[in-house]
Image: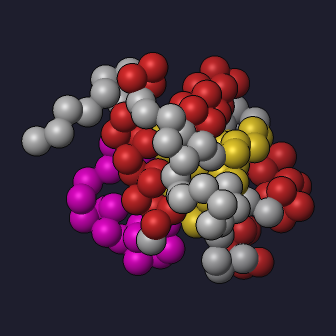
């Protein structure tokens, strides 16, 4: 089995897609914790994604269309509006943008399947391993 890097410093800085063939994927990271958004931004930019930060559900809803993002990483528990409420509003307007929920709350495999049936691309529990986080984002972007 291949060795997985344990920290983001060990993550290869390869582009998530072949150079010159496609645009760089744009991801919006939404969390009221600025340290979490900054960490996600640092990890994903290191592997070639463009990251747009948002620090509230309201900010996400105001910016995601004009930012033309391919994926939204959405914290579930935020003070202004829950990630789930943000997701439902986005889905009413945009069925194509991919959404990954991020939370400190764990999810059972059956609940994850239920979320995927509702249109969620993945669910990542915080804290996360940077290398596994990147793998999961790559997988979502390829789907």
Quick check: is 94 in the magenta stretch?
A: no
Q: Which residues fall within the magenta stretch?
A: 105-126
Image position of 102 with respect to 64: above or below:
above
Residue 127 quadrant:
top left
Whole-percent x and y of residue 87?
64, 63
Residue 51 versus residue 11: which sits nearer the camera? 11
Whole-percent x and y of residue 93?
77, 78
Looking at the image, which residue sits at the far left? 1
Q: Could you tell me which quadrant the C terminus lies in?
A: bottom left
Q: Could you tell me which quadrant the N terminus lies in?
A: top left
Residue 99 quadrant:
bottom right
Colour scheme of this structure image?
secondary structure
Q: From the viewer's perspective, is 4 left or right of 47?
A: left
Whole-percent x and y of residue 95?
65, 79
Residue 7 quadrant:
top left
Q: From the viewer's perspective, is 104 left or right of 55?
A: left
Looking at the image, which residue sits at the far front? 20
Image position of 128 with respect to 24: above or below:
above
Residue at position x 75%, y 39% in the image: 53
> Is any atom of residue 38 visible in this view?
yes
> Is any atom of residue 122 visible in this view?
no
Residue 64 versus residue 90: which sits nearer the camera? 64
Residue at position x 54%, y 47% in the image: 15
Q: From the viewer's perspective, is 40 left or right of 11?
A: right
Quick check: is 108 in the magenta stretch?
A: yes
Residue 138 versus residue 55: which sits nearer the camera? 138
Residue at position x 51%, y 62% in the image: 141
Residue at position x 69%, y 45% in the image: 50
Image position of 134 with respect to 17: above or below:
above
Number of marks drawn: 0
């Amino acid at each position: 089995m291949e060795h997985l890097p344990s920290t983001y410093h060990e993550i290869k800085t390869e582009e998530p897609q072949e150079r010159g063939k496609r645009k760089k994927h744009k991801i919006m990271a939404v969390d009221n914790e600025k340290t979490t958004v900054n960490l996600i931004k640092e990890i994903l930019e290191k592997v070639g994604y463009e990251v747009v930060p948002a620090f509230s559900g309201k900010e996400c809803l105001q910016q995601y269309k004009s930012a033309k993002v391919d994926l939204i990483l959405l914290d579930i528990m935020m003070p202004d509006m829950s990630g789930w409420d943000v997701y439902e509003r986005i889905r009413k307007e945009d069925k194509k943008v991919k959404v990954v929920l991020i939370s400190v709350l764990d999810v059972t495999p059956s609940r994850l399947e239920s979320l995927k049936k509702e249109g969620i691309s993945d669910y990542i529990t915080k804290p996360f391993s940077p290398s596994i986080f990147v793998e999961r984002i790559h997988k979502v972007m390829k789907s």
